[in-house]
Image (spheres, rainbow, N blue to C red):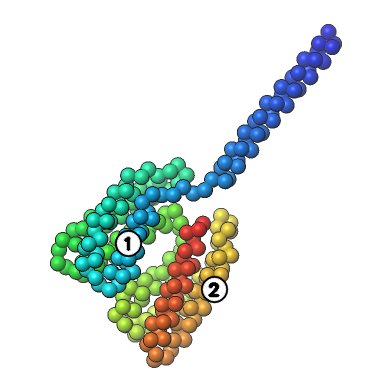
Amino acid sequence: MALSKKVAFLSFLLVSFFVVSSILAQTSAGTQQTTGMSKPRLEGLKEFHEVLQPIWHMAYAEKDYQAIRDAVPAFKEKIELIQKVELPGFYREKKDDYEKKREALAKAVLDLEEKSKGTDNEALLKATGNLHTCYEQLVRVFAPRVKELESFHLVLYPLWHEALPSKDYKAIKASTPALQEKMDVLMKVELSDKSKEIAPKFTEKRKALKSSVDDLVRACSGKDNKKIEEKLDKMHTAYQKLDAVFEAE
């Protein structure tokens, strides 16, 4: 009887060992699957950007109204693609914000189409600017920036899209105190723990932006307008490189 009890006890231990081992193995596999998960691609956003990029950086800047009008069918096609795609479960916490921003982009496309049928080119440009803003806001649902970088962009935006194209050097010079102020605040930002992977790049690109702001300020103290244009262009590029760091997050 004692021997039977020992055999039963040993059998119990063996079964328990295999059950626990199995559970641990499954847990480990699940953890690896979760931690190793990469962000799923959101179909439509890249395709929309491929249409938007030349319109925003060339047609809008050069006031090529016909090119903007010609791009409307492509914008409609890409927004339909975005609207058809179901948001992956990976982004479930961002679902409400995403759907709100997606709807805003869809309305911006419709507004651009409406303006493209008229003869008011200024209204067409305004609709294009709104379209670009709505797209940026949609993309940033998945790659949010620190608010200090957004504040810097609010000063840079009118310089790049209005003052520089119209060669309003007075406006550019007048903006330098605000640029310096926003840059000083941005230099004090510390990224959260969840953004620690991009921290080295952020620090590197932020330093480059600070240097470009200082260069523009020095250029604005003189009378060489070509140099002002050159330094503003370099500052804008430096901003874009810093902004792009968040896309890799």
**Mark 2 Cα within 10 Å, few/some/many (few <14, many 20+)?**
some
The location of residue 12, given as percent across then percent down, is 74, 19
Q: Is residue 37 above or below residue 146?
A: above
Residue 178 position in % (x across, y down): 42, 77
Residue 76, position as x, y percentages in the image: 26, 53
The residue singled out by tag 2 in the image is 207
Query: Which marked residue is nearer to the observer: mark 1 or mark 2?
Result: 1
- Residue 138 placement, left or right of 64: right
The quarter holding residue 237 reads bottom left
* Marks 1 and 2, the one that precedes in the sequence: 1
Residue 171: x and y in percent read 34, 81
96 over 15 or under it: above or below: below
**Left or right: where 187 falls relative to 42:** right
| SS at circle 1 | helix
Q: Name the residue nearer the viewer: 148 or 69.
A: 69
Q: Residue at x 33, y 73 (%)?
A: 161
Residue 210 is left or right of residue 232, and the answer is right
Q: Quadrant of the N terminus?
A: top right
Q: Quadrant of residue 170?
A: bottom left
Q: Residue at x 52, y 74 (%)?
A: 208
Q: Residues within 10 Å of mark 1 (few under 14, many from 20)?
A: many
Foreground of the two, 218 or 88: 88
Give the distance between the C-alpha atoms of the residues marked 1 and 2, in whole angstroms.
29 Å
Circles 1 and 2 in contact, beta carbons < 8 Å: no
Whether residue 93 is visible? no
Q: Secondary structure at mark 2?
A: helix
Front-most of 152 and 70? 70
Residue at screen point 46% across, 61% down: 145
Q: Give the tally of numbered discs.
A: 2
- Name the amino acid type tagged 1: Leu
State whether residue 222 appears in this view.
yes
**Residue 52 numbered mark, or none:** 1
